[in-house]
Image: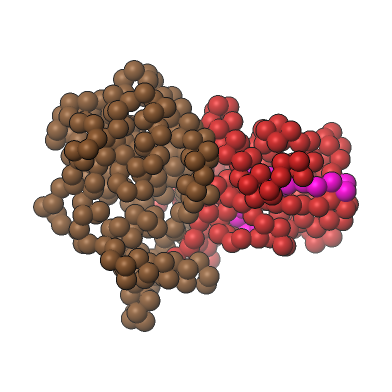
Chain colours: A red, B brown
Amino acid sequence: MNDLNNLIERATEMKENGMHLGQIADELNLSRETITWLLMHAEKKEGLRAPTDMSIDWRSIGESSYRMRCIADAVADMIVDGVGDRAEIDVVVGIAVSGIPLASIVATELGARLAIFHPNKQLFGTENADATGIFSHNFADVSDAECVIVDDVITTGGTLKETIRELTAIGAKPAAIAVLVDKRGDGAIEGVPVYSLLRTLWVG
Amino acid sequence: MNDLNNLIERATEMKENGMHLGQIADELNLSRETITWLLMHAEKKEGLRAPTDMSIDWRSIGESSYRMRCIADAVADMIVDGVGDRAEIDVVVGIAVSGIPLASIVATELGARLAIFHPNKQLFGTENADATGIFSHNFADVSDAECVIVDDVITTGGTLKETIRELTAIGAKPAAIAVLVDKRGDGAIEGVPVYSLLRTLWVG
């Protein structure tokens, strides 16, 4: 299968160039379980069945600043529709790394400040239950602020659960999550409504 | 599984209200094989394994004319980038039914005329090898014209193969296919390049 070989090749190249499991997962919009499987398959260790998963490639948008602006416009509009009042959004929280470009443009559209969250998965190769993510000190402080979270793709929702937990711990109030694609196809994460331009519903 | 029950319910409702298999497939962005499976499953006829397929829900875009405009802007830009020259596009061919709104707005963006193609699958419940689709007489004539084809989602590519065959038969020259999502993740159909805002790559 062409798709599969393509993904195995890209995952292997990223690993060889020093990327962690979580970083590869972020780059390919796949779960860490799927990345583990792709890397094992690449090394010809058989015995595991391929998980049913799907990589989302949105490079046609990301490669063009004009198209990024068009899409960010639509995402900002979706946020305002959902939250009900643009004035209620103080901060847009972008999820490192792939969510940052979209979050940056959405923040300018909304006239909001930009905060950046580095989730655990970006910092460690494998999950560490005790480690929390980190808010970047180079961008806005989101403590006690009304905010919306912006990312590119929701795969399992794990990263966003972690983000909401960390936001709540510093008194921030996440009013919404906005993404390009929700692969879970579900409505909310930890009680925070999810707005996605597209969502996928699985058969089988 | 919630997704599955949701899809079975929607497919069953459409069938009960008189929609053909191809029309349900268009509405849910699933293959006809998957729709057949969903309807059989609904009637508790066991014995078939669920196909691996995924429905694309882009209602967050479709429900808002502002967001439709944003997305159509991005699609039009992607077409111009791909084809190289806006002046070379005389006609935008929209695929009935779900591709029509996007094609209509893209045509205005490009300053092109709009043609509508009703593929075979919209006209018959099951595939009929001899039947061809129909170009609507209420919109532009695409004979001998340079054109681009616009649809919402590519599932198997069958509809677009049919469209290209019919366009070629009347002397039209399809320069590109542009869609929101390409579920095949491949580059071209019958030699005509495919430009998609998003594409999916399958694992498993």
Measured as percent of width and height from the top left, residue B129 is found at: 14, 54
Assign the magenta stretch its main secondary structure.
strand
Measured as percent of width and height from the top left, residue A184 is found at: 57, 59
Measured as percent of width and height from the top left, residue B201 is found at: 47, 49
Could you tell me if residue A182 is visible in this image? yes
| Count of labels in the image | 0
Image quarter hosting the C terminus of chain A: bottom left
Q: Quadrant of residue B126?
A: bottom left
Could you tell me if residue B165 is visible in this image? no
Residue A40 drawn above or below residue B133? below
Residue A3 drawn above or below residue B89? below
Q: Quadrant of residue B123?
A: bottom left
First to last magenta residue range: A143-157
- Residue B20 versus residue B127: which sits nearer the camera? B20
Left or right of B157 in this view: A95: right
Residue at the image position 27 percent from the left and 49 percent from the top: B158
Left or right of B182 in this view: A167: right
Left or right of B35 in this view: A18: right
Residue at the image position 40 percent from the left and 58 percent from the top: B28
Residue A100 drawn above or below residue B98? above
Magenta stretch encompasses residue A146: yes
Magenta stretch encompasses residue B94: no
- Residue B62 versus residue A91: which sits nearer the camera? B62
